[in-house]
């Protein structure tokens, strides 16, 4: 939470986004999927979709994973499809593989 407070105080939008996404990932790891989704959505929009050039959609990947964990597969599919598109757009081949894998799990 300190990194979020500092980033907000100095107006570092990318830092705020990384802090929100980190909090979301931490809550997802703890099994608190609803809180994870709230933090993911609280991140600035560009951060939800990757956070910075070359981010490859990591933010939206985390959001998709949280939705998948809650059993909201239609929303997970939307997120992982968006992650795949972003990864392709920025040339993130590893991200493409991760997105494809996650998309496949959501489609099962």
Image (cartoon, rainbow, N blue to C red):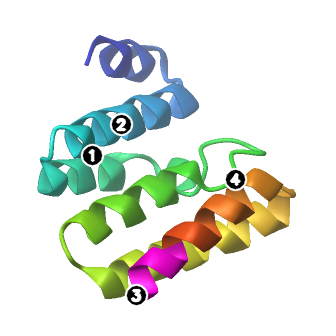
For label 2, the residue is 20
What element does badge 2 sit on? helix
Q: Residue at x 77, y 45 (%)?
A: 54
What element does badge 3 sit on? loop
What element does badge 1 sit on? helix
Q: CA distance from mark 3 to mark 1?
A: 27 Å
Relative image position of residue 72 (x, y in whole percent): 24, 79
Which numbered disc, 3 or 2, marks the residue that appears first in the sequence? 2
Image quarter of the N terminus: top left
Q: Residue at x 39, y 23 (%)?
A: 8
Q: CA distance from mark 4 to mark 1?
A: 19 Å
For label 4, the residue is 56
Q: Residue at x 82, y 57 (%)?
A: 93
For label 3, the residue is 108
Q: Is the C-beta separation of discs 3 and 2 under 8 Å?
A: no
Number of other residues with Cα within 10 Å of mark 4, as a class: few under 14, some 14 to 19, many 20 or more: many
Q: Is residue 37 left or right of residue 89?
A: left
Which numbered disc, 4 or 1, marks the residue that appears first in the sequence? 1
> What range of the chain is rendered magenta?
103-108
Q: CA distance from mark 3 to mark 2?
A: 29 Å
Number of other residues with Cα within 10 Å of mark 3, as a class: few under 14, some 14 to 19, many 20 or more: few
């Amino acid at each position: 939470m300190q990194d979020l407070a500092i980033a907000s105080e100095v107006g570092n939008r990318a830092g705020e986004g990384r802090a929100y996404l980190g909090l979301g990932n931490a809550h997802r790891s703890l099994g608190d999927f609803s809180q994870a989704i709230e933090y993911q959505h609280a991140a600035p929009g560009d951060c939800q979709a990757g956070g910075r050039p070359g981010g490859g959609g990591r933010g939206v990947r985390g959001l998709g994973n949280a939705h998948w964990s809650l059993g909201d597969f239609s929303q997970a599919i939307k997120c992982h499809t968006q992650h795949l598109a972003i990864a392709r757009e920025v040339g993130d081949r590893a991200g493409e593989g991760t997105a494809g894998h996650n998309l496949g799990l959501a489609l099962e």
